Amino acid sequence: MTYCYTITNVGTMPLAWHNVEDTAEGMLMQGVQTPLGVGQSYTLLRTTTLTHAQAVTTTWHAYNEARAGSPSATAADTIHIHTTAASHTLYLPLVTR
């Protein structure tokens, strides 16, 4: 499964630093400097193998400067993922040529 995380800066000032964390994998990005101007978007992709149904909450925190108290924005969302068993059919006799 591929997760696609996208953040869009809908604020009034640019955001330069980013942290992304989810409840399944933990910290995905920490203190990554990626300038994001007003109206711009950034996408992060992550591919994983699922073995069971789960709910995953992701939090993206963007901030203007790498210091406490700087202007920032935080967004979080939860998705519920359901898995289904794979189905394979084998017809016998198996003939190879």
Image (spheres, helix red, strand yellow):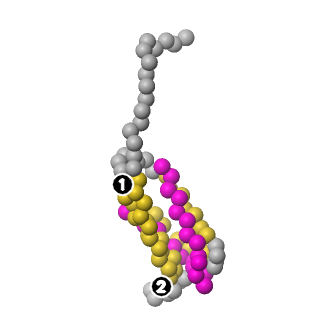
> Which one is nearer the viewer's eye here, 84 or 36?
84
**Mark 1, secondary structure of its residue:** strand
Of residues 22 and 16, the one nearer the viewer is 22
Q: In the rendered structure, does residue 5 fall within the stretch colored magenta?
A: yes
Q: Say which label, 1 or 2, has the lower sequence index.
A: 1
Tell me if 53 is positioned left or right of 17 in this view.
left
What residue appears at the point 47 percent right and 77 percent down from the top-left corner? 74
Which of the 4 image quarters holds residue 87? top left
Q: Is residue 55 above or below residue 91?
A: below
In which quadrant of the rendered image does the C terminus lie?
Answer: top right
Query: In the rendered image, which residue does mark 2 sit on?
Result: 67
What segment carries the magenta color? 1-23
Find the distance from the CA under tag 1 to the CA under tag 2: 34 Å
The residue under the point 45% across, 50% down is: 48
- In this rendering, which labeled residue sits more in front, label 1 or label 2? 1
- State the residue in front, 29 or 92: 92
Chief secondary structure of the magenta portion: strand
Residue 93 seen anywhere in this rendered image of the structure: yes
**Label 1 belongs to which residue?**
54
- Mark 1 belongs to which amino acid? Gln
